[in-house]
Image: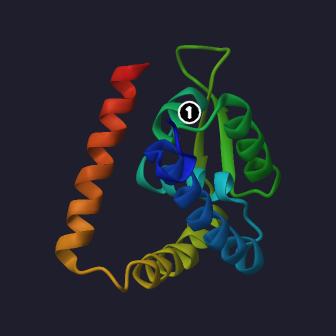
Amino acid sequence: MLRLDEFLPYQLSVASNAVSSAIARTYEVLFGLRVPEWRLIAVLAEQEGVTQQALVARTEMDKMTVSRAAQALVSRGLVTRVPHGRDKRSHTLALSEEGRALYAQIAPKALELEQRLLHELGAREVAQLKATLAKLKSASHALR
């Protein structure tokens, strides 16, 4: 019999939602960003000139969520949107100077939140958790 509280996909979802919710409040209050917007900023800080399709793949967010987040960031002047050189229907996104400045403020806060979240775990446990999550992500892709 399926018991929801013992079902790993449910546990992962609940844990993910709890973590995202706690962090989302901080990003909203301090920086006026929702979690999808923060995720796009973080990806764009690592890689310039990314298409929305590539952002969907990288963040595992749906197309509509990425589109709305991108539009909000462009409207705020945090992200620039230019036509893709080869595909005229596609655009690439990049952080503006203002977006890079905001990322420079957010990144240390994100790392601080991660440390606070993981403070009860030892370095070995954190490494094992990350390795396990990577394996679960890979296994989930195989199920698709």
The amino acid type found where label 1 is placed reads Val
x 54%, y 21%: residue: 85
Residue 34: which quarter of the image? bottom right
- What residue do we see at 38% from left, 78% from top? 118
- Residue 88, x across and y down, in percent: 65, 14
Residue 135, position as x, y percentages in the image: 26, 42
Front residue of 101 and 39? 39
Task: Please tell me how crowded label 1 is: few (under 14), some (14-19), or many (20+) other residues with Cα within 10 Å.
Answer: some
The structure's colour scheme is rainbow
Extreme residue in the right direction: 75
Name above or below for residue 55 compared with residue 112: above
Residue 100 horizontal side relative to residue 9, left or right: right
Q: Is residue 57 above or below residue 124?
A: above
Q: Residue at x 21, y 61 (%)?
A: 128
In the foreground, 131 or 96: 131
> Where's residue 1, x and y in %?
50, 35
Residue beneath disc 1:
56
Farthest residue in the left direction?
A: 124
The answer to which quarter of the image holds residue 87 is top right
Q: Quadrant of residue 124?
A: bottom left
Residue 4 percent across, percent down from the top left: 56, 46
The image shows residue 7, relative to residue 30, as above or below, that is: above
Is 21 rendered above or below residue 93?
below
Number of numbered discs visible in the structure rendering: 1
Does residue 115 appear to the left or right of 109 in the view shown? left
Secondary structure beneath dot 1 equals: helix
Residue situated furthest front in the rendering:
1
- The quarter of the rendered structure image containing the C terminus is top left
